[in-house]
Image (spheres, grey):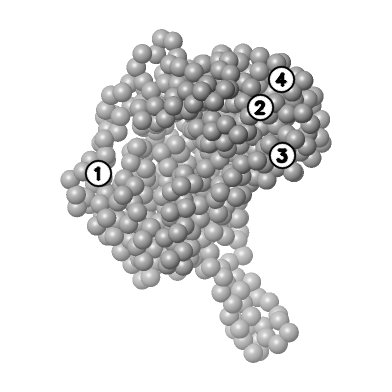
Amino acid sequence: MYQRDRLYIGGEWVPSTGDDRLQVVNPATEEPTGHAPGGTPADLARAVGAARAAFDGGRWPALSPSDRAELLDALADELDGRADEIAEVITAESGLPIRLVRLIHVGGPVATLKYAASLARTHPFEQDRQGRLYRFRVRQLPVGVVGAIVPWNIPLLGACAKLGPALAAGCSVVLKPAAETPLSSFYLADAAEAVGFPPGVLNIVPADREAGAHLVTNPGVDKITFTGSTAAGKRIAAICAEQVKRCALELGGNAAAIVLDDADPMETANHLVGMSLANNNGEACIVQGRVLVPERRAGEYVEALCAAAKGIPTGDPTDARTMLGPMVTSQHRDRVMDYIRMGSHEGARLVHGGGRPVGLERGWYVEPTVFDSADNNMRVVREEIFGPVVTVIPYRSDAEAVALANDTEYGLSGAVFSADPQRATQAAHRIRAGSVYVNGAIMIEANAPFGGFKQSGIGREGGPEGLAEYLETQSVFWPTTIPD
């Protein structure tokens, strides 16, 4: 059992003002795996107050960027030193396969914080310029107090994607982990305490959606950064608009992988397995769930995709060989199964999977599932399933393939496969999405900007573009020489 009984606010471990506990159940065993305190609106208000004090009167934003970088490096090293334990906790609370967790969900946060430290050291926070009449200095200042809301599918990775650049910029942060996966976030508090972050710079309050809404509405928060559904993001954006509060939104996706007619079927299928069915258990906004194949070769690609799906090691997420674990909750498994039934009802042809994997009687598992003969008007195609399900859609020309890929309200990611890299790249440039993956490449780089077009969000995480999300620009003018 992984138990946490106190919240981390103002550099101290404090009890919640409420009695609720967030009970965490292991998705693979359906047994309790731990609990954390359920934060209340009063707890979140206290955390905002601590962050406000740390920003307005504390020394954090006044530290030099290099000093902040030193603490970020130390924070990353602390997490790295506890990597094995953190990986076990993430797997226990989320059902994600341990080998994926070690590489992406623990290795990724460490790399993200290290990159943020490097940005703090190298970013031009001040630049002097000469205008027509005046000389002036352009300053990049921290936006202030940040409310960071992270989802259950990337609990630590999502947190550090926000914390790294926010802290590098000089902001203070209130982190609200998801109620389904709150346990791993407390390692950030452990690490911050161990390396000596100033009180109030980082505050951690897990809470359900209802309590978390108070973080968005609190006028003491200068910016909300949110990762989650488009529906929730729209509500957050509306609230922020009323206060003219800054917000960054990383929302849903419904990506299409275009398979050009010269792509090798089996090689492509093996890549697609890792980009869709076995990508974070299918619970990822960048999943390539729509597979667009040339009509005249559709049978070959469907056969290869089914063979690759059949070979996915599915089961115990603590087994290093496993590529596909269970869905995060029973409710989410039911939702995915509802989409599978919907697909059959709409006329798509179920060619692989569609049920519970044989031999796995416990756990919230869904078989890797492949639909053929789908079209872009079906709900099972147009909506984000967030599970190990792909739909295969035929097309007649490269132009039609690009049009189908772009025929969605989302624009987070996409992919292209071809034996000709130049041809693939030309198609990739026509996809209206924030990230496009060519021939199996997929986004895992801390210095790559990530975010969406259209209803997939506002803003970017990663790269210098991610740091810019937490900075305000100020110009200071002088009539003569700029003072030292």
Dot 2 amino acid type? Ile
Mark 3 in CB contact with mark 2 (< 8 angstroms): no
Mark 4 vs 1, N-terminal side: 1
Q: Residue at x 70, y 42 (%)?
A: 431
Q: Give the SS element for disc 2.
A: strand
Mark 3 vs 4, N-terminal side: 4
Quick one: which residue is furthest to the left in this view?
19
Q: Give the SS element for disc 4.
A: helix
Q: Is residue 13 above or below residue 255?
A: below
Q: Give the SS element for disc 1.
A: strand
Dot 3 amino acid type? Ala
Q: CA distance from mark 1 to mark 3?
A: 48 Å
The picture quadrant where one finds residue 274 is top right
Mark 2 vs 1, N-terminal side: 1
Mark 4 in CB contact with mark 1 (< 8 angstroms): no
Characterize the local packing of mark 3: few (<14), some (14-19) or many (20 or more) Cα atoms within 10 angstroms.
some
Q: Which residue is mark 1?
A: 37
Q: Is residue 317 visible in the rendered structure shown here?
A: no
Give the image location of residue 462, x and y in percent: 57, 49
Mark 2 vs 4, N-terminal side: 4
Q: Residue at x 61, y 59 (%)?
A: 122
Q: Nearest the camera: 479 or 265?
A: 265
The picture quadrant where one finds residue 2 is top left
Q: Residue at x 55, y 54 (%)?
A: 458
Which quadrant would the C terminus be assigned to in this image? bottom right
Mark 3 vs 2, N-terminal side: 2
Q: Which residue is mark 3?
A: 403
Name the mark nearer the viewer: 4 or 1: 4
